[in-house]
Amino acid sequence: MKSDQEKIMRLLKTARGQIEGLMRMVEDDRYCVDISNQILATQAILRNINHQILQDHLHHCVREAMVSGEGDEKIEEVMAIIHKLTK
């Protein structure tokens, strides 16, 4: 993976902390809307991470595959991800 691993790990640890916080909120029977807002915040972090990883994949892995004449497989991989994202 050619992404900025330090940045990605920091964001993943933040998301993990939010998920742990969500678990505590559910255990403490907190207000549903507050829980939902925290879920949305966690999803936003995960979307940001995914965006960064996919962007780096396109700029490095896909570009290298295109130059070497092996880009079709990489394009299909990206298309499968786009399909999942648009469901």
Image (cartoon, rainbow, N blue to C red):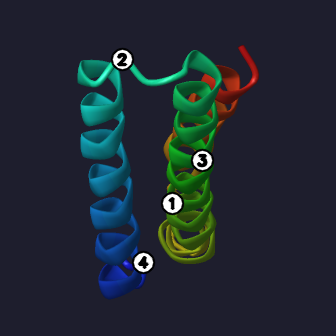
Q: Is 20 placed above or below 13 here?
A: above
Q: Which mark is residue 49?
A: 1
N-terminal-most mark, 4 or 3? 4
Disc 2 to disc 4: CB gap under 8 Å:
no
Alpha carbon separation for disc pair 2 and 4 = 38 Å
Instruction: From the top left corner, tell me how far across and down residue 50 is, in percent.
Output: 53, 53
Q: Nearer the viewer, mark 1 or mark 3?
A: 3
Q: List the residue tagged with mark 3.
A: 41
Q: Quick one: which residue is furthest to the right in this view?
A: 86
Residue at 23 percent across and 21 percent down: it is 27
Q: List the residue tagged with mark 4.
A: 3
Q: Tag 1, which secondary structure?
A: helix
Which of these two is toward me, 45 or 59? 45
Q: List the residue tagged with mark 2.
A: 29
Q: Nearer the viewer, mark 2 or mark 4?
A: 2
Categorize mark 4 by other alpha carbons within 10 Å: few (<14), some (14-19), many (20+).
some
